[in-house]
Amino acid sequence: MLGLERFVPFHHGLLGHPRRHEPYTRPEHIRMALEDLGAAWIKLGQILSTRADLLPPEYLTELAKLQDAVPPVPSEAVREVIATELGLQPEQVFASFDPTPLAAGSIGQAHAATLFDGTEVVVKVRRPGVVEQVEQDLELFLNLAAAASRRWELAEEYDLVGLAQEFAQTLRSELDYLREGWNADRFAQNFSGDPTVHIPRVFWELTTSRVITLERIHGIKINDLQALEAAGVNRSALAEQTARILLKMVFEDGFFHADPHPGNFFVEPGGRIGLIDFGMVGSVDEPTQERLTTLLLALTRRDPDRLVEAFLDLGVARRRVDRAGLREDLQHLTARYYNRSLREIAVGPLLADTLAIVRRHRLHLPTNLVLLLKTVMMAEGLVAQLDPDFRLTDVLVPFAERMVLKQYSPLRWVRRLGTAGLEAAELGAELPRQLRRLVRELEQGELQFGMRPEGFEPLMGRLERLANRLVLGMLASAFIVGLAVLMAVFHPPNVERLVGPAFGLGFVAAVLLGAYLAWTILRPHRG
């Protein structure tokens, strides 16, 4: 953004934007531009709204308003997709099929249907042509990211190409309904022993990459507070139950629903919670859990040095980091929570402060960690709607304590030692062969070393400025000498009348060049 938007009265209804008295803010301009560009760009904005490590809160809030406001697919096109994928017309597959969609999105739309045995289902159908359109947009994203990284230092520092590739991977996974079905089955297995959670059944005989058939969930949306009150639901108990479900996914299963907004949670009669929409999921592997535990311990012990190491171990650094500055910021962070137990700390503000440090030092969080932080923050917001007095840390702390005990249990250390012993044995067996290869390359002169001269950038900049001054000085001298030689050797007619103006112009040009050269030498330079 060039800052020119304030001169264009978009808020007066230009280009179809809603009229209002106040000018649109920059985040609002970006959100409306993404809406105008179409489905894939809206998805990009939705995903960016989860990247609190990249964007400040005002942008996250505005981008979170992006919705898949697209017209529904015509019923004939839906019938054609179902017939192509399932081999039969909808009335041959379902006892009833409602052509009016329950919801329409940029990827697909959902229809209510009934099987011949009376089971109510939801049939999600992918929009025709969406894969081709998405691939075109993704190619454009990747090209723009590559061009920006070549020409914009900040884009390279944030690894814009890597972010574009992550977005492409996320969007492609949402296009495949088979993957969503596998995700639903995995959640069903993880909660198979919990009667308080309802994961819809996948009807695999009626599911392909373009069509997925799921058991229909009936209930009250979890943010419909009036309906919950009318049904006599204990909102405080519901908040605790919801928090436990989400935290179990993260800390016990290592596989979690990464889009826990209220529209994906339903409260069924009897208090069971039904979950839907498993297109976006996240995972936390064992090494990440261990690093998060180390980070938590460093935070509770208010150890800034260990906190820096834990931060960097999470893989957030893709460039040289100002460790002293990072340590100072983390020390200020821990000082704010001095003499407060974990149960007294609100998770949302703590994560917001942490992510502000991540942005300030231009660190980059791995995708799974971004999804994890977003899920925890959304979980706190979700339970706060149900019960403003409920604190997520009341449920979070026991999970965190179990993580610490699990990491430092004797069984875990025995297993670690066994793994380390195997790796040491493999290294001992591999080392002679690697040493022979190294000696052979050394003897043949084929050994090469790679260097990244990041620390030389300021020096290279000074050398470039010095070279520019030398070239400018030589040009000024050549101009003066050349002018004098021409005036002495070349004698055109009426030369006397031309000498004065030519000399004057040459003198002025030489003075200007010399003054500019002196200014470039004397002015202060950064770095």
Image: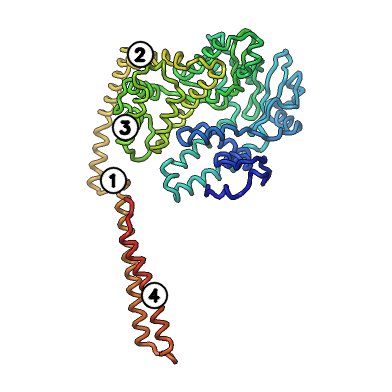
Q: Residues within 10 Å of mark 4 (few under 14, many from 20)?
A: few
Query: In the rendered image, is residue 470 in sight?
Result: yes
SS type, badge 2: helix
How many callouts does the rendering have? Answer: 4
Q: Residue at x 51, y 31 (%)?
A: 50
Residue 233 in which image quadrant? top right
Task: Judge left or right: residue 230 versus residue 161.
Answer: right
Task: Judge left or right: residue 413 versus residue 39.
Answer: left
Q: Residues within 10 Å of mark 2 (few under 14, many from 20)?
A: few
Distance between mark 1 and mark 3 Cα atoms: 32 Å
Across and down, in percent, residue 485 comes to 34, 83
Residue 311 in which image quadrant? top left
- Which residue is more in the foreground, 104 or 483? 483
Is label 1 or label 3 in front? Answer: 3
Is label 4 or label 2 in front? Answer: 4
Q: CB under 8 Å between callouts 2 and 1?
A: no
Q: CB under 8 Å between callouts 4 and 3?
A: no
Residue that carries the numbered disc 3 in the rendered image: 327
- Which residue is more in the foreground, 271 or 349? 349
Distance between mark 4 and mark 2 Cα atoms: 80 Å
In the displayed structure, would residue 411 be above or below residue 479? Answer: above
Say which label, 2 or 1, has the lower sequence index.
2
SS type, badge 4: helix
Residue that carries the numbered disc 1 in the rendered image: 449
Residue that carries the numbered disc 4 in the rendered image: 508
Q: Residues within 10 Å of mark 3 (few under 14, many from 20)?
A: some
Distance between mark 2 and mark 1 Cα atoms: 44 Å
Say which label, 3 or 2, has the lower sequence index.
3
Say which label, 4 or 1, has the lower sequence index.
1
Across and down, in percent, residue 75 comes to 75, 31
Q: Residues within 10 Å of mark 1 (few under 14, many from 20)?
A: few
Type of amino acid at the residue the image marks with label 3: Arg
